[in-house]
Image: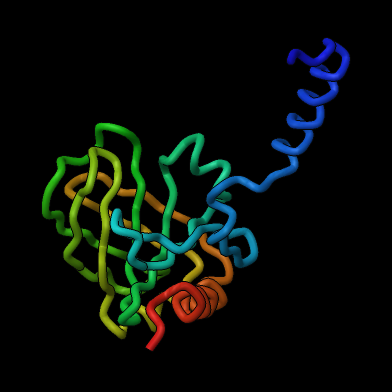
Amino acid sequence: MRCPPVKRGLICIALLIAASAAAPAYAQNLITQGSWEGFAMRSPDNQFDRCVLYNRSVQVLSATPYQMLGITRDATGRIGLLVFYEPRTLTRGPATVRLKLDQRAPVTVAGEALSDFHVNVPALDAATVTALRDTKAIEAAVDTHTIRFELSDVGAVLDRLDACVKMYGPKT
């Protein structure tokens, strides 16, 4: 049985309103801290991987995932970084990353360029994490490519990542 056009039109409008009011799929794990936004990441087999907060909104990073910084925390408590450059900047594979936090001496950490524009630093040492908590600016260099970020409220970001892991991470 076919519905008259008026009813079909009303149903379409009702469905459109309901769909536009629904939260995006990623919102179930959306986390925020001030101007930082991110989410709990899962592996392809739906196992908790880590929590990440980016120095921009999820909406903006989805549109242009370049020139941004992510701070991560995994289930074991390791703090790491995701550094995003411009496309075609990096060569995939192991990478040595030089970090300069504010006016402190640079530190060198191991990372991996996961694409031609972003590098993953899975773990920072305790001294670097302590310095990161109060950092206002960070420079990250891979080969001859340096990017700088002005940061705010990193201590609260680290605390929020800890809470995210407790909420979404493995339960013991």
Q: Quadrant of residue 110?
A: bottom left
x and y, in percent, of residue 127 in the image? 31, 84
x and y, in percent, of residue 120 in the image? 27, 57
Foreground residue among 93 and 8: 8
x and y, in percent, of residue 96 in the image? 15, 58
Q: Is residue 42 left or right of residue 137?
A: left
In the picture as drawn, the residue positioned furthest to the left comes out as 94
Q: Quadrant of the C terminus?
A: bottom left
In the picture as drawn, the residue positioned furthest to the top comes out as 5
Q: Is residue 47 above or below residue 148?
A: below
Q: Residue, x 34% and y 53% (percent of image)?
A: 83
Q: Residue, x 51% and y 67% (percent of image)?
A: 136
Q: Quadrant of residue 27?
A: bottom right
Foreground residue among 6 and 50: 6
Q: Is residue 78 left or right of residue 17?
A: left
Q: Evaluate whether residue 134 shows in this view.
A: no
Q: Is residue 10 above or below residue 142?
A: above
Total numbered labels placed on residues in the image: 0
Q: Residue, x 41% and y 64% (percent of image)?
A: 71
In the picture as drawn, the residue positioned furthest to the front comes out as 1
Q: Is residue 123 above or below residue 12?
A: below
Q: Is residue 144 left or right of residue 48?
A: left
Q: Quadrant of the N terminus?
A: top right
Foreground residue among 60 and 48: 48
In the picture as drawn, the residue positioned furthest to the bottom comes out as 172
